[in-house]
């Protein structure tokens, strides 16, 4: 015998107001909606972005499959997963999508990353740490850059050559030489600060770029700049700024160093 479902009265319920009228607005992203493709192994980028982004800018992330060991072959494998990962983002109107891997953007190619994102969201603006770093140094008027990374030598020299091919000079480099992304995420900000001061102290450089979304730089950038007397940025720091500017947020953001007081140049 089938028993029809019956409404259940909640004990002690005095009033039950249904169909309450409501109004809507633009949600969290009153200024901009930003989407971020985060590597599965990354433990840092979301925290850094939330520190850097002002109120009114919404950030939504989707995790991209990625190997723990950072090698060129492993980085190339991520390309095919980009469209599917974009499809995991929530159903909002995105202004900008960021691809959260510096070395991956280099190995896959910045234009190819953007192409794969636009397969899913044709009208969205796309950036990555390499594209963002180039825009950042243009905004700050720096061309001679000290490069600090956690990568193995193969990736370090590919990164240097790529930046030089795009118009920067890289006369100084330093690396923690650690291929395990889980360990890179645990490198202390004190160790990163010392390394920035070491590589940036050379008279041959005008600024420092810390490459890798797993390295924690956003919270120390302004302090280290004051000690060094030169601009400092990183993969996360530069990409959050670039996404802000691409998303239409043109106002200075205090406490994050020279870059966040700089406009995006054409």
Image (cartoon, rainbow, N blue to C red):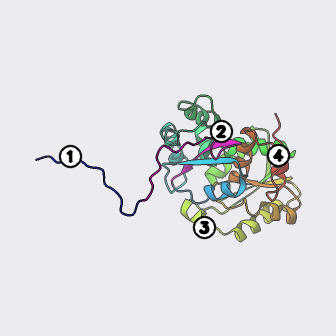
Residue at image location 55% in from the left, 47% down from the top? 72
Crowd band around label 3 with a 10 angstrom C-alpha radius: few (<14), some (14–19), many (20+): few
Residue at image location 66% in from the left, 44% down from the top? 29
Q: Reading the chain from its start, which is encountered first: label 3 or label 4? A: 3
Q: Write down the residue under mark 4.
A: 251
Q: Nearer the viewer, mark 3 or mark 4?
A: 4
State the extent of the magenta-drawn residues as a range.
14-40
What number is the disc on residue 114? none
Distance from Cα at disc 3 to Cα at disc 4: 32 Å
- Residue 38 on the magenta span: yes
Q: Write down the residue under mark 1.
A: 4
**Secondary-structure class at tag 1:** loop
**Secondary-structure class at tag 4:** loop
Crowd band around label 2 with a 10 angstrom C-alpha radius: few (<14), some (14–19), many (20+): many
Q: Write down the residue under mark 3.
A: 186
The dominant secondary structure in magenta is loop
Q: Nearer the viewer, mark 2 or mark 1?
A: 1
Residue at image location 89% in from the left, 58% down from the top? 203
Distance from Cα at disc 1 to Cα at disc 3: 58 Å
Distance from Cα at disc 2 to Cα at disc 1: 50 Å
Q: Write down the residue under mark 2.
A: 96
């Amino acid at each position: 015998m089938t028993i029809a479902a019956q409404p259940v009265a909640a004990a002690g319920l005095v009033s039950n107001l249904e169909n309450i009228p409501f109004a809507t607005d633009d949600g969290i992203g009153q200024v901009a909606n930003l989407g971020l493709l985060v590597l599965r192994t990354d433990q840092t980028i979301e925290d850094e972005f939330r520190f850097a982004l002002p109120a009114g800018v919404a950030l939504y992330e989707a995790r991209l499959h990625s190997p723990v060991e950072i090698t060129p072959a492993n980085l190339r494998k991520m390309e095919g997963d980009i469209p599917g990962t974009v499809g995991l983002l929530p159903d909002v109107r995105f202004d900008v999508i960021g691809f959260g891997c510096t070395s991956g953007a280099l190995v896959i190619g910045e234009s190819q990353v953007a192409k794969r994102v636009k397969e899913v969201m044709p009208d969205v603006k796309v950036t990555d740490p390499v594209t963002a770093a180039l825009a950042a140094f243009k905004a700050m008027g720096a061309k001679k850059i000290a490069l600090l990374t956690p990568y193995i030598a193969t990736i370090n020299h590919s990164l240097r050559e790529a930046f030089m091919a795009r118009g920067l000079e890289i006369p100084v480099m330093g690396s923690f030489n650690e291929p395990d992304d889980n360990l890179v995420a645990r490198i202390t900000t004190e160790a990163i600060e010392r390394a920035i001061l070491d590589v940036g102290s050379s008279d041959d450089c005008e600024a420092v770029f810390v490459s890798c979304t797993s390295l924690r730089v956003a919270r120390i950038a302004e302090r280290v700049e004051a000690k060094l007397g030169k601009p400092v940025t990183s993969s996360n720091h530069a990409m959050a700024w670039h996404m802000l500017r691409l998303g239409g947020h043109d106002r200075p953001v205090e406490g994050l160093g020279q870059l966040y007081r700089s406009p995006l140049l054409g």
